Image (tube, rainbow, N blue to C red):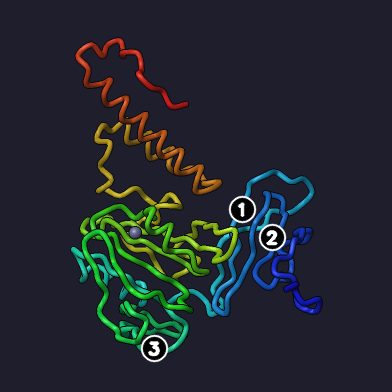
């Protein structure tokens, strides 16, 4: 079966000569701009631009990536309700969603403000409408995803706010995903990203202010160099800690690059700690492995 002639192409390939081009593709647009290649797509509730490849392209403007919510940022009161609900669920994880409508069956109402409603999605294991509470433990949570959720956030309670391999595998719809972490400390963490929901599946970290109105409070937005938390106490050597903090404030070209930087930093910090603890550490022993 061929694509109908009259229908828009599933993907359009366009050049951003004067800022972001008008949407053309039915599924998404692949756009060349001054900083490389990005994917542009939309739902009824948001528009997103996710960087696919970084390259310096002369003569074209750089189009900012990230997400814009069609009905405006989510009210600060819903962010506060979300955090309170995640804290109340501790030590278990919990999955929460923000929808731009009234709650439906299988969605437990938590709070509403303006066009948005905060809900706790329930679990329909058999797909027959037999809704059950979420199945949650300290390291996982199971619920039936909401088809038109704008934002989906789960908590990692005491663990860091990072997207695990399981999250990478499960969180592939076109929406904003978030993780809350270290909720048991005075300096909790937040990580937000937007996913394309199509092929190529790609994600882009987004700052708190693109999603929520109001203040982050004590939370640290881990992808955007927020104030390092007092609980971020590893490595414990102050010199190593300041090195780690400084280098983690790099603007991130891509998730892969940032992950590799983090791994290299961690390995370097571990090696320095080992070296510092060796009795013959002056002069420092030859490194057994040096990430460069
Ligand atoms: Zn997770």
- The image quarter containing residue 135 is bottom left
Q: Residue at x 26, y 81 (%)?
A: 132
From what the image shows, is residue 30 above or below residue 132?
above
Point out the tag, 1 or 3, that comes first from the N-terminus: 1
| First reached walking from the N terminus: tag 3 or tag 2 | 2
User: In whole angstroms, how far apart are the C-alphas of marks 1 and 3?
Assistant: 35 Å
Q: Residue at x 42, y 89 (%)?
A: 102
Picture layout, residue 223 above or below residue 24: above
What is the C-alpha distance between the residues marked 2 and 1?
Answer: 9 Å
Q: Is residue 190 left or right of residue 204?
A: left
The numbered mark, 2 or 1, whose residue comes first in the sequence reads 2
Packing grade of label 1 (10 A; few <14, some 14-19, many >=20) is some
Secondary structure of the residue carrying tag 1 is strand
The residue at label 2 has a CB less than 8 Å from ligand 1: no
- Mark 3 neighbour class, 10 Å CA radius: few under 14, some 14 to 19, many 20 or more: few
Q: What residue sits 43% from the left and 59% below the top?
A: 169
Q: Which residue is mark 1?
A: 52
Q: Which residue is mark 2?
A: 30
Horizontal and vertical percent for residue 249?
45, 44
């Amino acid at each position: 079966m061929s694509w109908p002639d009259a229908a828009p192409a599933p993907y359009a390939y366009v050049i951003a000569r004067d800022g972001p081009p008008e949407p053309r593709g039915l599924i998404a647009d692949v756009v060349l701009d001054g900083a490389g290649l990005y994917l542009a797509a939309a739902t009824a509730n948001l528009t997103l631009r996710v960087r696919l490849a970084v390259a310096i392209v002369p003569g074209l403007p750089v189009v900012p990536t990230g997400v814009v919510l069609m009905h405006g940022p989510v009210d600060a009161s819903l962010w506060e309700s979300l955090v309170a609900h995640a804290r109340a669920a501790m030590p278990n994880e919990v999955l929460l969603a923000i929808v731009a409508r009234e709650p439906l069956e299988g969605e437990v109402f938590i709070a509403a403000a303006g066009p948005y409603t905060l809900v706790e999605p329930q679990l329909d294991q058999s797909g027959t409408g037999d809704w059950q509470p979420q199945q949650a433990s300290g390291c996982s949570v199971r619920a039936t995803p909401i088809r038109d959720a704008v934002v989906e956030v789960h908590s990692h309670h005491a663990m860091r706010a990072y997207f695990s391999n399981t999250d990478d595998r499960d969180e592939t719809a076109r929406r904003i995903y978030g993780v809350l972490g270290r909720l048991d400390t005075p300096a909790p963490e937040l990580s937000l990203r937007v996913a394309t929901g199509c092929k190529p599946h790609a994600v882009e970290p987004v700052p708190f202010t693109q999603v929520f109105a109001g203040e982050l409070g004590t939370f640290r937005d881990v992808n955007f160099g927020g104030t390092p938390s007092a609980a971020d106490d590893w490595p414990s050597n102050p010199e190593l800690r300041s090195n780690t903090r400084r280098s983690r404030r790099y603007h991130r070209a891509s998730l892969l690059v940032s992950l590799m930087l983090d791994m290299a930093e961690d390995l370097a910090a571990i090696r320095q700690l080992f070296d510092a603890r060796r009795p013959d550490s002056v002069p420092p022993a030859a490194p057994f492995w040096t990430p460069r």
